[in-house]
Amino acid sequence: MYDVLIIGGGAAGYGCALTLASVEDKFEWAKGRTYMMLDDGQSDILKARFYNLAGVEFGIGGDALLQTMQKQLANYQSVQQLPLKVIKIEDSSEGFKVYCEDGSLYEAARVVLATGMHSFDIAVEGVEILSHEDVLKPHKICLKHTDNIIRQGLYVAGLASGAKTMFAIANGEGAKVACQIFKEWTGKPMVAHDSLKNEK
Ligand SMILES: Cc1cc2nc3c(=O)[nH]c(=O)nc-3n(C[C@H](O)[C@H](O)[C@H](O)COP(=O)(O)OP(=O)(O)OC[C@H]3O[C@@H](n4cnc5c(N)ncnc54)[C@H](O)[C@@H]3O)c2cc1C
């Protein structure tokens, strides 16, 4: 049983996963929590070269950027990443059951949909698919939500939420959802900061 399962390993998925995992040993309320990211390898990042993304090598290719994020996340014990396609999500007494195309099943208290804007073909109750209105190309989709929450325990981030198609915006939305989950766990505003002052 994972505390949070993220579907989608693109800009939004990594923003969420890195934020969640980065507090794993910092706070009592975060210790022992576990996270899973499932992704079927179709991120828009793989089609792009980035000159306008702050803090990374100028003109970095999408494949190199994705690999960097995969390695960054692998630094954290609390999170696993698997190359799997999700086909169905069912409600359960403790949260959600997440079914994958290969027949595997994962359970989580919370699920974050970071599935991009191209299509949404996961069978799940209570998700309404809308047309993504903030893109140049036709036939793109997003999911109905209020402040990134679809319904209790089910969140959406990145282009799947209707965000503008910029890496930083999608990535920031993933981090925002993680901070929302921290707030639900702690009952107060919370962020994930690493401070130079605390280094030994
Ligand atoms: C050609 C091109 C050039 C671009 N150039 C720039 C640029 O210069 N600067 C910039 O800021 N942005 C650029 N972008 C936009 C940027 O890549 C996107 O804004 C960003 O990738 C969106 O992040 P996301 O996480 O919402 O979606 P994505 O990165 O697309 O990630 C969604 C992920 O969800 C996975 N997924 C979907 N359904 C399932 C499922 N059922 N099971 C498992 N996994 C699933 C997909 O495989 C994918 O990996 C460019 C995009 C393109 C296409």
Image: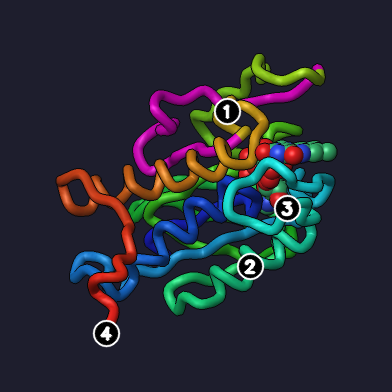
Q: Report the span colored magenta.
A: 138-158
Is residue 156 placed above or below 141 in the rendered structure?
A: below
Residue 41's quadrant in the figure? bottom right
Mark 4 or mark 1, earlier in chain: 1
Numbered circle sitting on residue 163: 1
Q: In whole angstroms, how far apart are the C-alphas of marks 2 and 1?
A: 23 Å
Q: Is residue 50 left or right of residue 92?
A: right
Q: Are marks 2 and 1 in contact (CB under 8 Å)?
A: no
Residue at 57% x, 46% y is 12
Q: In whole angstroms, how far apart are the C-alphas of marks 3 and 1?
A: 24 Å
Residue at 68% x, 25% y is 141
42 part of magenta stretch: no
Q: Which residue is mark 4?
A: 200
Callout 1: CB less than 8 Å from ligand 1: yes
Q: In whole angstroms, how far apart are the C-alphas of marks 3 and 2?
A: 19 Å
152 part of magenta stretch: yes
| Residue 173 place in picture, x, y as percent | 48, 39
Mark 4 or mark 2, earlier in chain: 2
Q: Secondary structure at mark 1?
A: loop
Residue 80's quadrant in the figure? bottom right
User: In the image, which is nearer the foreground, mark 3 or mark 2?
Assistant: 3
Numbered circle sitting on residue 58: 3
Numbered circle sitting on residue 70: 2
Q: Secondary structure at mark 3?
A: loop
Mark 3 or mark 4, earlier in chain: 3
